[in-house]
Amino acid sequence: MLRTHTCGELTPKQSDQTVTLCGWVHRRRDHGGLIFIDLRDRYGFTQVVFDPEDKNTFAQAEKIRPEWVLRITGKVRDRVEGAKREENPTGGIEVLATKAYVENESETPPFEIDQEKEVGEEVRLKYRYLDLRRERMKNNMLLRHKVLQYVRRFYDDRGFIDIETPILIKGTPEGSREYLVPSRLYNGEFYVLPQSPQQLKQLTMIAGFDKYMQIARCFRDEDQRGDRQPEFTQVDIEMSFVEADDIMKITEESFINLTKEIRPDVKIQETPFPRITWKDAMDTYGSDKPDLRYELKMQDVTDLCKDCGFGVFASVVKNGGVVKVMRVPNGAVFSRKDIDGLTEVAKIYGAKGLAWIKSTEEGLEGVPVEKLGEDLSKEIAKQAGAEQGDILLFTADEFETACNSLGAVRIEVAKRQNLADPKVFSFAWVTDFPMFEVDKDTGAVGAV
């Protein structure tokens, strides 16, 4: 081993010991003739000191720059009072360098590794190896590792068998487009990458393995959106001789126990997990995966707008569409710029626009009020529960577009108003999904 210790394990117990550390230069500081560097590896940081009395080592330290990879040999010593950093596990010591080996130099990084500044996604992906050095990304990777370790233990303790299923399989119709892989041996034939191991895990049930689990890689050739990925990992389970409630029960148990083990600081909002039908979730929250940590519920005012004077609403209803409204408490303070930003969010999900009515001291304000009339506007505001200082946001379109677009606005409003408590998890079951859907481009009916 080139190192005797990691950068996160030295304490005053190792004082006066000679150690060797390997890592990256996180920061470099030149203070009053002494040069300090914070040496970093995935375990933590250790402060290394270069003394000018050691001319060779000090001369080398003068050349060192951030992100160089070093191997340092030196003696551990206690830090002086006032220089200790109790928040850092190694904050009570430092290493006085006696030898320094440059394992690898580094060009100036395109972004600062030691600061959690926002960096463009394109740059982050281009320099992914640098991005993964950042503290936040490192913690994400470690958290993911712990979650996967826990999941495997949880299901193993309950008699599940971890079975790895093939990646190259025969294509079968499912909800999304599949990635095709041409066969070299069979000209004109293709494999597909699995959207999920659905049929494969059912084969394990037929074979008699009554409890199957897998950390499964899935591939779906979908349009790129924030909640869609071409490849992703899912916890995949299957059981024989059970009912739906049995699956739900063991899944809830895994989520509750996982939260307690990995995030003991987080509260689960409700147990057992509430169950919501797909239709109710879309109607009320505009999402098939609603965030229940905050209200911002949507309402349907289609019937009230059926023969209204607002042509936008009336024409949508006439063509079989719906009009949805969401009350935002204290939203009357939204500026035109704020509303324009929310409108752009709605348009991403297919909405043609976002109508609004504000409830102020002077009464109801907004373009729809002029078209709907005072009485109908008040009736809609009453149904929505509007109070003075609120804003009502409307979408009008076919059902899914109206719901999805206003649901996206709901999420954006919650972000802007910090409505979601990060210390709360709100799990829920969404049931009774539609079996089929119509492709908007081709009109073809396919499985969801």
Image: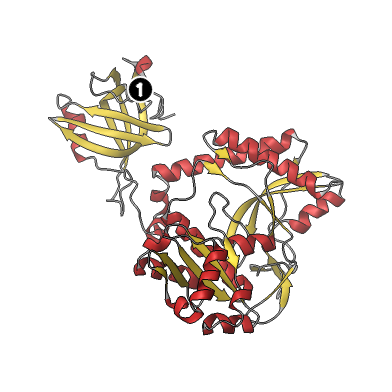
| Front residue (pair 411, 356) | 356
Quick check: can you spot residue 230? no
Seen from the viewer's position, the closer of residues 335 and 269 is 335
Identity of the residue drawn at 35% across and 17% down: 12
Residue 95: tell me if it is visible: yes
| Residue 257 image position (x, y, % from top left) | 64, 35
- Classify 10 Å Cα crowding around label 1: few (below 14), some (14-19), many (20 and above): many
Q: Residue at 38%, 23% (x, y): give it.
A: 10
Foreground of the two, 112 or 438: 438
Q: Quadrant of residue 150?
A: top right
Indicate left or right for 142 with 271 as reference. left
| Element type where label 1 sits in the image | strand
Q: How many marks?
A: 1
Query: To which quarter of the image does residue 335 belong?
Result: bottom left
Q: Quadrant of the N terminus?
A: top left
Q: Where 144 sits versus 382, above or below?
A: above
Q: Is residue 31 left or right of residue 379?
A: left
Q: Which residue is painted at 23% across and 19% down in the image?
A: 80
Q: Quadrant of the C terminus?
A: bottom right
The residue indicated by pointer 1 is 19
Give coordinates of residue 232: x percent, y percent: 59, 55
Lateral position of residue 177 relative to residue 294, left or right: right
Write the residue at 78% across / 58% down. Answer: 199
For badge 1, the amino acid type reads Val
Name the image colouring.
secondary structure
Q: Is residue 165 left or right of residue 36?
A: right
Residue 238 point in image, percent of width and height: 77, 48
Most extreme residue toward the left is: 32
Q: Position of residue 292 (x, y in %)?
A: 58, 51
